Image: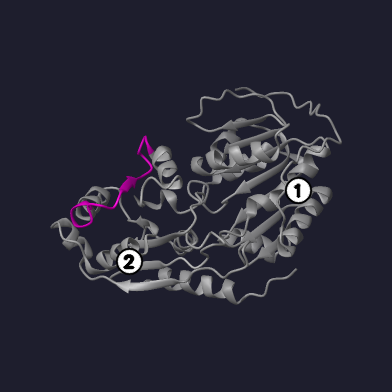
């Protein structure tokens, strides 16, 4: 796709928003902040805990920009996030044609007022968007990628607004806030008002040797026994793709009546398996960090195997823990971290979650 002229010949004054949900007072404050940034053409960080309802907080800001005749883009580093966002935005803005762009989509590019895409797709745009919203700004492959950050800068118009969303901002964003280059809105509580589930460390010495020999280790056994007896669904995270078949084999032998699917970034059926989990057709997913963020599954518990592996940054651990407790019906999911050593990353993640739980929610 070459450079496309930017006519911005969109109707002004049209209210496309059909979402009938109700924001909490704290969410409403953040929503108003986003509208203020659009009007003032300044950039903003929305620092909100996992499960705070970030997508819903965007709706009024997006609707406001569309009314002004602005062109809007919501971008994420993760394909999974874009795929999940697309139907939600279609349902909330039913009268608006939306284009979804990522490397595997069959949808062809069309010039539309609202675009949902991966951050890699932003490399194809120049001065295109009045409002650019970047979800999960600290996630791989965007984190630390100078080319993709340049693409974000290039894809937006000079007189425009960029909104960054994350629960775990990196040092660059924090420095920009500190230096006054970036406005910030905080939301330390989830949409249902309950605190974040805290990580419980479970020491598991020699777990990998046991798995390699075909034995289940005690923490994994206890976790699965609890899930089975309580009839709760779950996610089990492992550090490496090569470990997935070993652990899956052991679980299948010891708990043959549990339906568990392995999922990883190179799995061609990844999205179908997540949908099986979402529809309740499987009891759990055995996954790598590919599901650390973006995918929302209610009423689940979490086990992080090998949580002392260097693949798990403190931000990744916070995000993984944030998969639990997402529903109002069960806001207190369990998060177990199985490890041989309590690393700095584990301790930092625990401290960050506790800090957010102590923070006062401003209305």
- The residue labelled by disc 2 is 226
**Sequence-earlier tag: 1 or 2:** 1
- Judged from the image, the secondary structure of the residue bearing numbered disc 2 is helix
* Image coords of residue 130 (percent x, y): 75, 39
Q: Residue at x 43, y 39 (%)?
A: 271
Disc 2 crowd, CA 10 A, few/some/many (<14, 14-19, 20+): few
Could you tell me which residue is drawn at 41 percent across and 70 percent down?
346
Q: Magenta region: which residues?
A: 252-269
Q: Which residue is mark 1?
A: 60
Image quadrant in which the N terminus is located: top right
Residue 53: x %, y % from top left: 63, 56
Residue 95, image quadrant: top right
Using the image, tell me which numbered label, if any, was put on residue 332.
none
> Is residue 220 a member of the stretch shown in magenta?
no
Percent of width and height locating residue 135:
60, 49
Quadrant location, the C terminus: bottom right
Mark 1 touching mark 2, by CB under 8 A? Answer: no
Please name the residue shown 72% across and 57% down the image.
23
Magenta-highlighted stretch: main secondary structure?
A: loop
The Cα atoms of the two marked residues, 1 and 2, are separated by 42 Å
With 126 as the anchor, is 212 left or right in this view?
left
Q: Is residue 255 magenta?
A: yes
Report which quarter residue 98 is drawn in.
top right
Would residue 362 be visible to someone looking at this image? yes
């Amino acid at each position: 796709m070459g450079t496309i002229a930017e006519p911005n010949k969109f109707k002004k004054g049209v209210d496309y928003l059909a979402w009938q949900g109700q924001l909490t007072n704290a969410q409403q404050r953040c929503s108003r902040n986003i509208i203020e940034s659009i009007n003032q053409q300044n950039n903003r960080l929305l620092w909100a805990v996992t499960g705070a309802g970030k997508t819903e907080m965007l709706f009024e800001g997006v609707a406001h920009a569309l009314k002004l005749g602005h062109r809007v883009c919501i971008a994420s580093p993760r394909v999974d996030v874009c795929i999940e966002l697309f139907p939600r935005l279609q349902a909330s803005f039913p009268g608006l044609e939306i284009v979804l762009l990522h490397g595997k989509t069959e949808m062809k590019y069309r010039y539309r007022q609202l675009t949902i895409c991966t951050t890699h797709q932003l490399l194809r745009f120049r001065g295109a968007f009045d409002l650019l919203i970047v979800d999960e700004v600290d996630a791989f492959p965007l984190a630390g990628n100078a080319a993709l950050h340049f693409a974000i800068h290039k894809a937006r118009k000079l007189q425009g607004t960029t909104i960054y969303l994350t629960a775990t901002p990196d040092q660059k964003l924090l420095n920009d806030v500190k230096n006054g280059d970036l406005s910030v809105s905080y939301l330390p509580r989830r949409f249902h008002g309950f605190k974040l589930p805290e990580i419980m460390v479970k020491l598991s010495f020699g777990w990998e040797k046991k798995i390699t020999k075909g034995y289940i280790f005690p923490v994994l056994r206890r976790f699965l026994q609890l899930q089975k007896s309580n009839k709760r669904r779950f996610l089990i995270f492992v550090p490496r793709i090569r470990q997935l078949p070993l652990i899956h084999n052991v679980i299948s032998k010891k708990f043959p009546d549990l339906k568990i699917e392995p999922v990883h970034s190179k799995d061609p059926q990844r999205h179908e398996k997540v949908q099986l989990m979402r529809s309740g057709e499987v009891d759990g997913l055995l996954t790598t960090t590919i599901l650390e963020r973006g995918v929302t599954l209610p009423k689940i518990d979490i086990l992080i195997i090998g949580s002392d592996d260097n693949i798990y940054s403190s931000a990744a651990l916070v995000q993984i823990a944030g998969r639990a407790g997402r529903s109002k019906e069960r806001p207190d999911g369990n998060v177990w971290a199985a490890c041989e050593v309590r690393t700095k990353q584990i301790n930092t993640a625990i401290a960050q979650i506790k800090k957010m739980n102590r923070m006062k929610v401003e209305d």
